Image (tube, helix red, strand yellow):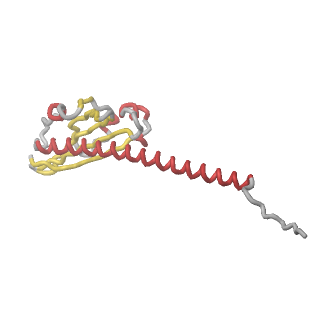
Amino acid sequence: MKRNRPRLPTGFTLAEAVIATVLIVLVILGTAGYRWRSSYDVQHSSTQLDAISVANLLCEGWRGRDGSEAYNPVAHLSPLLEITEIEPDLRFTEAVPYGYTLHGFYDIAIDGKTFGALLAWKQVAPGLRELNVGVIWSVREGELLETALDSQDYRDIHLYRLTTYANR
C-alpha cells in the first residue's frame, strides 16, 4: 500500500523573488553612489592641491624677493603659469585681511581650472613684513571662478590663505 506523504514546497515564492531583487538593486545603487562620491572627492582634492601649490608658489616667490612692493608675479611666473593681473572689484577688496595693504589680484589657470589669487602685505615691525596670499576657486566642476562669483552663491567658493614673513 502506498502512502501519500505531504510534499514540502520547493522553489521561491513571488514575494521572495521581489525582495531579493530589491536587495540586489539597493546594493548596486549603493556601490555606484560610493564610487561616484569617491571620484568626486579625488577631483576636489586635486583642485585643492593645485590651489595650495599656487598659494605656495606665489608666497615663496614674493618672499624670495624680500616682500618687495615691486614684486610682479606676472613677470616672474608667466613661463610657469597662465597668469594675468586683473582689476579687483568690491568682492575682492573685501577679502583683504584687516590692516593689510592690497598688492594685487591675479587670475591663474591650471589644467582648465581657474583660481583667483589675492596678494596683500602688512608692515608688522621695522624691517619685518607679513605677506598674505589668498587663493579662491569654485568647487563646481568646469565652472569658471568669475561665473561662480557673479552667481553670488559663495557656498561653492573656497579660500585658502597662506601667510609668511619677509625681512625688509
Q: Which residue is located at x 17 percent, y 32 percent?
A: 79
Q: Is residue 124 above or below residue 135?
A: below
Labels in figure, total: 0
Instruction: Determine the residue positioned at 19% across, 44% down.
Output: 59
**For this rendering, which residue is in front, 114 or 157?**
114
Residue found 16% across the figure and 34% down from its top: 72
The answer to whether 139 appears left or right of 21 in the picture is left
Find residue 97 and report its horizontal and vertical position in percent. 27, 45
Above or below for 27 versus 59: below
Residue at image location 13% in from the left, 43% down from the top: 67
Residue lying at the far right of the rendered structure: 1
- Seen as rendered, the residue at the extreme front is 1
Residue nearest the observer in this picture, 154 or 144: 144
Q: Where is residue 115 in the image (x, y as percent from the top left)?
A: 31, 37
132 or 57: nearer the eye?
57
In x, y percent, where is residue 77? Answer: 17, 35
Q: In which quarter of the image is residue 16?
A: bottom right
Q: In this view, does 162 lie to the left or right of 63?
A: right
Please say if 48 is above or below 86: below
* Quadrant location, the N terminus: bottom right
Q: Which image quadrant is residue 158 in? A: top left
Quadrant of residue 153 in the image? top left
Q: Whole-percent x and y of residue 100?
A: 23, 44
Q: Is residue 163 left or right of residue 153?
A: left
